[in-house]
Amino acid sequence: MAKWVYMFTEGNATMRNLLGGKGANLAEMTNLGLPVPQGFTITTEACTQYYEDGKKINDEIMAQIMESITKMEEITGKKFGDKENPLLVSVRSGARASMPGMMDTILNLGLNEEVVEVLANKSGNPRWAWDCYRRFIQMYSDVVMEVGKKYFEELIDKMKEEKGVTEDVDLTAEDLKDLAGQFKAEYKEKIGQDFPTDPKEQLMGAIKAVFRSWDNPRANVYRRDNDIPYSWGTAVNVQMMAFGNMGDTSGTGVAFTRDPATGEKKLMGEFLMNAQGEDVVAGVRTPQKISQLHEVMPEVYDQFVAICDKLEDHYRDMQDMEFTIEDKKLYMLQTRNGKRTAQAALQIACDLVDEGMITEEKAVAMIDPRNLDTLLHPQFDAAALKAATPIGKALGASPGAACGKAVFTADDAKNWAARGEKVILVRLETSPEDIEGMKAAQGILTVRGGMTSHAAVVARGMGTCCVSGCGDIVMDEANKKFTLGGKEFHEGDAISLDGSTGNIYDGLIPTVDATIAGTFGRIMGWADKYRTMKVRTNADTPGDAKKARELGAEGIGLCRTEHMFFEGNRIDAFREMICSETVEEREAALEKILPEQQGDFEKLYEALEGNPVTIRFLDPPLHEFVPTDEDDIKKLADAQGKTVEQIKTIIDSLHEFNPMMGHRGCRLAVTYPEIAKMQTRAVIRAAINVQKAHADWNVCPEIMIPLIGDIKEFKYVKKIVVETADAEIAAAGSSIKYEVGTMIEIPRACLTADEIAKEADFFCFGTNDLTQMTFGFSRDDAGKFLDAYYDAKIFENDPFAKLDQTGVGQLMEMAITKGKPANANLHVGICGEHGGDPSSVEFCNKLGLNYVSCSPFRVPIARLAAAQAAITAKNA
Ligand code: ADP
Ligand code: MG
Ligand code: MG
């Protein structure tokens, strides 16, 4: 019989896959002898089983849960529904990877009218008893029955108004009892049934709700962003309550062993007296700093500090902990390796190495490559920043610089961003429903909440700039405006945020690019020691190439020559070429283009300092370049000595029904060999010149023919290239070498890779097209239906962002297995968007690729991901 439930005493930290992160760590803390309210964990496998059984908890699992309740009652000496010593529990979700705030928790479960009276009488603290009860009804109604929080919050606000108080804590036992009654009435009205009184029925409802929450929309979005498979499922933790809401000797808080924003080694955190769990993060009241606990309760503070040290030492990483003090007694409710900013991640990894806590290899392995993205994003221009005066200041909750137009709802943020606007999301506070809007925004500004508020935690996770808790803002969400620093801001007004200092500015402050230095450079240095795959970049201009070199690129894996035609008035000659009717006309136009291409290539080779440069020949459908406006058409007609009518006829003739599968790629070279000849001349002449200028470099251009599906196509184009190149080299008396290879982006090329490899010097997977051609849907149109595919669980990810290893990956593997034996010198790389995606990079490492190539700003991410892949492979 499978074991579906583990007591905290039966688990440990290594059982994360089965028990989830929270459950495994509660067990580990129990093993370490720390004060953990006891309970049990229902496994992630039980969650998967629940879905397999058609969203039902089967008899076997149910029986094990019941057995565990009995054990828990024995351990705690309390009983569900008991008239003497009633047991109250929390029901908490916990997946393998932490997903803060994504799934739901229910506290104080086990209460009913009788039990609440028992608690009130026995404790002599009726306020506490009724506070628990009203919270429970609220959470249960919201999470289990999906009644919605807002009705209850409205009732609380009304009650506070009637009583003339501003804070929840100022409500009396009587008020809370009254509220509990109102809540139950609300429940009955919405659900049509009485609020459940049987603790075991409540428990089963709550467990199912946690399983269900695995599939809620915000959890699905979070998983997609963080590469967490749906199949993992969540565990459920049932744990005895520790009460932080018993009065002034009780409280609750969260803390980090190091600063999650900067990495600085110091205890950081917040707590609230007379409060329960999520009060601290919900921004209901403004919490106190953890250091102040030293004054409030010195002994508890010292005990807590000792536990923090012990946990960090044990896990050898920065810990993020939750605790509750119940009448001066400390309880630990959670520990995990804390989420942190990229900057903090680097600092902490370096510090841990310096402290002798971890090895360099471990330091490389512990940094999430996706996280680095934020460091590679622009920061405010220093001069512009100096000149700017902040109009307000709050907590720098997630670093980075952001500017954009103010919007007031998550939906607006999403919609404005979708039409290309940069927006700053301004909210009283955020909640998990806002996640997509937060993602779409450049930055987030909240009126309420501390460093551990929802907005702060989520923004740090996403690497989005966030300034939180700006109490100076007078907010009018309903009318989409706020006042700050004496100025009224409306929807669409420009503001800038500094997520490091917490400063808020009026207007847009220009930003500048980031560089690799300090801890970043140190970690990259270590990463380079372990990595076996090379990292190149996709760059079309010398500027991009230079930036990529600074970020550690070891070559260009893809230069898209068509991108070079958009500069200045080059497009004119290019249009003349497209609209030529004879070879002579076309050659005349190409003569104009040749020197410009050659010049560009020279600059690229210069920027790459002798490192390999792969130049892809003209690829896109030609009609993308034809003029559309009348003036341009007239200009072209004059240049060609044709009438406007003639040009329009030519343009019409270029129209294609399915241009992505039309006259493009190597097909252009087959129909117009003169284009391939011109590009070859430009590549070779540039290489000869740069080689001459730098005798110590080894300039060896790699010419890449796109969209090959048949070896005969490749041979045909290669012959043109080789004849032209060899003639150029001979004429110049040069001994320069060059390679001719192909992009692998059509499934047929994978299927016949053995034939192609005999002729090709290299393969480079163009996984954008390969994905498009393999799935048979257009990468430009997929956005329209992908959401429906996510909702229907057909796709978990966008296959254009994360490589489809099962299908597209198999084609890649086939191309390598067939290609390598056919050509011992064949080198293989990838230059699709996936070349900078960490999980795809790992896959490429497994396939034995020689390099990945990605956009300049993803180069460091790819370097780190490649190192991690090599470390994983080595330790496997
Ligand atoms: P999340 O993963 O969203 O943080 P948690 O399950 O950790 O959700 O719980 C939400 C809040 O409830 C936390 O502040 C936590 O400390 C508190 N909490 C959970 N279980 C208990 C318990 N047994 N006693 C007291 N507080 C609890
Ligand atoms: Mg928690
Ligand atoms: Mg392509």
Image (spheres, rainbow, N blue to C red):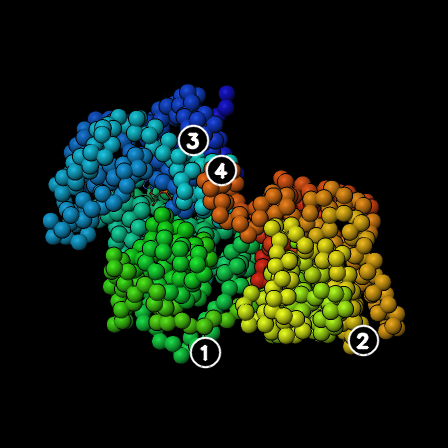
Residue underneath mark 4: 793
Report the Cα–Cα distance between label 4 and label 1: 49 Å
450 or 677, which is in the foreground?
677
Residue underneath mark 1: 383
Q: Secondary structure at mark 2?
A: helix
Depth-wise, is mark 3 or mark 2 nearer the camera?
2
Question: Going from the N terminus, do you reach mark 4 or mark 1 first?
Answer: 1
Q: Secondary structure at mark 4?
A: loop
Q: Residues within 10 Å of mark 3 (few under 14, many from 20)?
A: many
Q: How many marks?
A: 4
Name the residue type under label 1.
Answer: Ala
Report the Cα–Cα distance between label 2 and label 1: 42 Å
Q: From the viewer's perspective, is residue 29 above or below residue 837? A: above
Name the residue type under label 2.
Answer: Lys
Q: Is mark 1 within 8 Å of ligand 3?
A: no
Report the Cα–Cα distance between label 3 and label 1: 56 Å
